[in-house]
Amino acid sequence: MMFRSKIDGVFITCLSIAILIIAAVTLLPPLLDKEASITVVMIMVAIFLISVSFLLWTTFSIKYIFYEDYLFVKGGPFRSKIAYPSITKMTPMNDLFTGYRILSSKEGLELFYQSATLGSVKISPKNRDEFISELKKRCPNIEI
């Protein structure tokens, strides 16, 4: 069973601001410099496109997939394979900017598990209640 990430307005606003800053830093200097060669302009456009593509890829490819033995959390190149027995606790969270997070919404869930690098991962499934129900089926001992 697969769940997509919820995307809220706060996250879209932050993403838009980040893209505008990247555009200002990479595109404006070579365009305003009358002596900039076409090579410099092309390099800066390539840097802009690669940076924005990476941001969009990590944002819009977020998935939470329930496999038989583990929960697979994926967002762009970032992936976590979480065995069900290692999941100890799940709590609601309302934080977008701190911790290890593979989410695109301010409101989500924090999963604590034994092999976590930072102790937990923050996620934001679109169908939150359905996700919690599925997780309870696979992790009957989880503390909520």
Image (cartoon, rainbow, N blue to C red):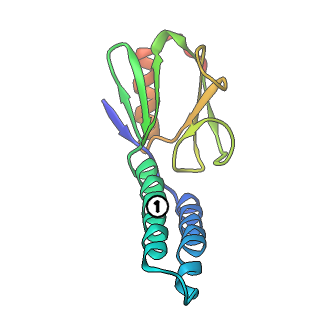
Count of numbered circles on the image: 1
Where 76 sits versus 16, above or below? above
- In percent of width and height, residue 91 lies at 62, 30
- In percent of width and height, residue 123 lies at 53, 37
How many other residues sit within 10 Å of disc 1, few (<14), some (14-19) or many (≥20)?
A: some
The answer to which image quadrant residue 100 occupies is top right
Query: Horizontal placement of 54 versus 66: left or right?
Result: right
Residue at image location 53% in from the left, 67% down from the top? 19
Q: Residue furthest bottom?
A: 34
Residue at image location 58% in from the left, 38% down from the top? 101
Residue type at mark 1: give it.
Val
Q: Quick one: 86 or 40, which is closer to the camera?
A: 40
Q: Quick one: 54 or 134, which is closer to the camera?
A: 54
Residue at image location 53% in from the left, 12% down from the top? 86
Where 23 sits versus 90, above or below? below
Where 140 sits versus 74, above or below? above
The quarter of the image holding the N terminus is top left
Q: Which residue is mark 1?
A: 52
- In percent of width and height, residue 23 lies at 54, 72
Residue at image location 33% in from the left, 21% down from the top? 67
**Helix, strand or loop under label 1:** helix
The quarter of the image holding the C terminus is top right
The answer to which image quadrant residue 110 occupies is top right
Query: Horizontal placement of 67 versus 20: left or right?
Result: left
Q: Quick one: 119 or 135, which is closer to the camera?
A: 119
Query: Horizontal placement of 69 versus 93: left or right?
Result: left
Q: Quick one: 74 or 38, which is closer to the camera?
A: 38
Query: Horizontal placement of 77 versus 13: left or right?
Result: left
